[in-house]
Image (cartoon, grey):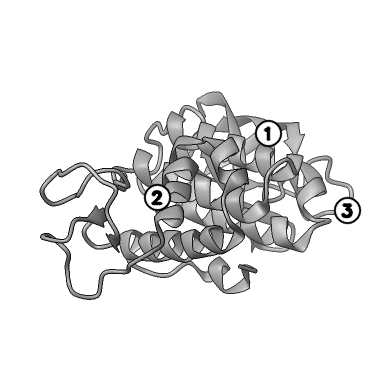
Amino acid sequence: MPLYRDEAVVLRTHKLGEADRIITLLTRQHGRVRAVAKGVRRTTSRWGSRLEPFTHVDLQLAEGRSLDTVTQAETIDPFHGRLGLDYERYTAGTVMLETAERLVTEEKQPSVQQFLLLVGGLRALAGGEHGAGQVLDSYLLRSLAVAGYAPSFDHCVSCGDEGPHRFFNPSAGGVLCTMCKLPGSATPAEGTIRALAALLSGEWQVVHASDPRHLREASTLVAAYLAWHVERGLRSMAYLER
């Protein structure tokens, strides 16, 4: 079987037989990949901790018809070790993993930007420099933008009129002016719109200076925007502390 090597983040695992696991990976060059890790559940396996969710790994895989096979695994960064000690950061991380799996829909199709966003997001989450909720919201907005669902926070998404605007609608794709507003649109505070724009662009000084109530409102809008564009709700969102 042909062999290939790639970096990957482990998104999810589930049992196969008595000792194996199927590992769902987001790889740098090959996009989403599903592979078998043989014997990984045995206590003598040298790969057990290297193929857990959140782990950033360097892998060698053998191509298969429906599932590839992991033949080598070396840990680059064991994010699960740091995230597992903090419930808020751990649950935020699980939302990141599920989001990445849902947004990268085609198997074996390169998705370098999504891979780099996920690694950067997990690194920021594990580093603790920014709040877990803000790291998650920034990651969600950026990953949606890369997937083709970039929200607008400075121009009306309908007519293009420059803001600031006070209406926000997930189905429309961002803010709307008074003339274009749709029924059911939210009316967030001006500070919330500024916080959302800063989260999308990575302006952390603006995020840190934002009022906590504006950040909470921003999180609610990010969750609504995500839910609209992934169509089915994420299971991991139910465990998230907002």
Label located before the other in sequence (3 or 2): 3
As measured in the structure, the alpha-carbon distance from the residue carrying label 1 to the one carrying label 3 is: 20 Å
The residue indicated by pointer 3 is 43
Q: Quadrant of residue 154?
A: top left
Q: Nearer the viewer, mark 1 or mark 3?
A: 1
| Front one among 90 and 42 | 90
Question: Measured from the top left, where is residue 72 in percent x and y?
Answer: 70, 31
The answer to the question of whether label 3 and label 2 lie on touching residues, with beta carbons closer than 8 A, is no
| Badge 2 amino acid | Leu
| Badge 1 amino acid | Val
Horizontal side of residue 125 vs 137, given as left or right: right
Taking 95 as reference, is 150 above or below it?
above
The residue indicated by pointer 1 is 57
Label 1: few (<14), some or many (≥20) within 10 Å?
Answer: many
Question: Measured from the top left, where is residue 117 in percent x and y?
Answer: 52, 36
Q: Nearer the viewer, mark 3 or mark 2?
A: 2
The residue indicated by pointer 2 is 103
| Front one among 207 and 106 | 207
Query: Is residue 66 in view from this perspective?
Result: no
Q: In which quadrant will I find the C terminus?
A: bottom right
Q: Secondary structure at mark 1?
A: strand
